[in-house]
Amino acid sequence: SSRLGVLIAGEQKRNDRAQSISEATTLSALSLALLIAAVSMFSLHRLLSRPLTRLVADVQEVADGDFDRPIGSSGATEIALIAAAAEAMRQKLIQHSTDLSEARRALTLTEERDRIASDLHRTTIKQVYALGLTLQSMSARDSAHATELNGLVDDTDAIIRGLRGVVFDAIPEQPAKADGSQAPRRDSSPSAT
């Protein structure tokens, strides 16, 4: 029985030692798991949160009107894909904005040309055209001064073409014929009034 007591006491010591080792291993495993979780949280924050926060800030700046601010594409693959799509959208917004500005400028120019043309037609061109018709009529009645008057008629026609060309930038100079006379003119008929 004393041998049995020694055996039981030895077995008890081994169980206590195994229990201590088991508790130490459990505590070490728990500490390692907590350390891995902390490192994972830091890594997740670094890989996702920071790039996502930068992406949101960049997109917000563009949304607030700063179209010159490029949208960075760092971070995890998914965030980089979203950032690249947002950057492409920003560039298209810039292009559309430029196109719209050019269209507005062209429309303003067209409207201004139309206004100037209308003002010129109502006043100056009609007066110069009437002067040309008067000079033509005088030339037909006064053959002694017909050559001089016909030159003045040609000058008034050139003035009208020049005024229209300035406004519309579309009526080219009439080329001279081989004999030195002017080619047939547009708008030299009475319907030009």
Image: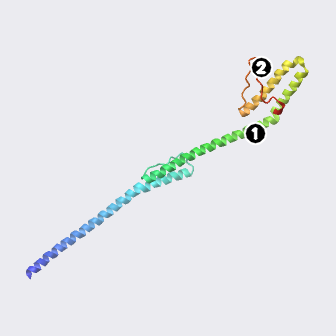
Q: Which quadrant: the C terminus?
A: top right
Where residue 60 appears, x then y in whole percent?
Answer: 53, 53
Please report the residue visible at 10 percent of the width from the left and 78 percent of the height from the top.
Answer: 6
Residue mark closest to the camera, 1 vs 2: 2
Disc 2 residue type (three-letter): Ser
Task: Answer with mark 1 or mark 2, whichever residue precedes in sequence.
Answer: 1
Per the image, the residue denoted by label 2 is 181
Q: Which mark is residue 49?
A: none
- Mark 1 Cα-neighbour bin, 10 Å: few <14, some 14–19, many ≥20: few
Three-letter amino acid code at disc 1?
Answer: Arg
Residue to which mark 1 is pinned: 115
Residue 132 drawn above or below residue 87: above
Expressed as whole percent of the image width and height from the top left, the position of residue 129 reads: 83, 30
Viewer-proximal residue among 19 and 88 = 88
Depth check: give the residue in front, 78 or 109. Answer: 78
Asked which secondary structure carries label 2, the reply is loop
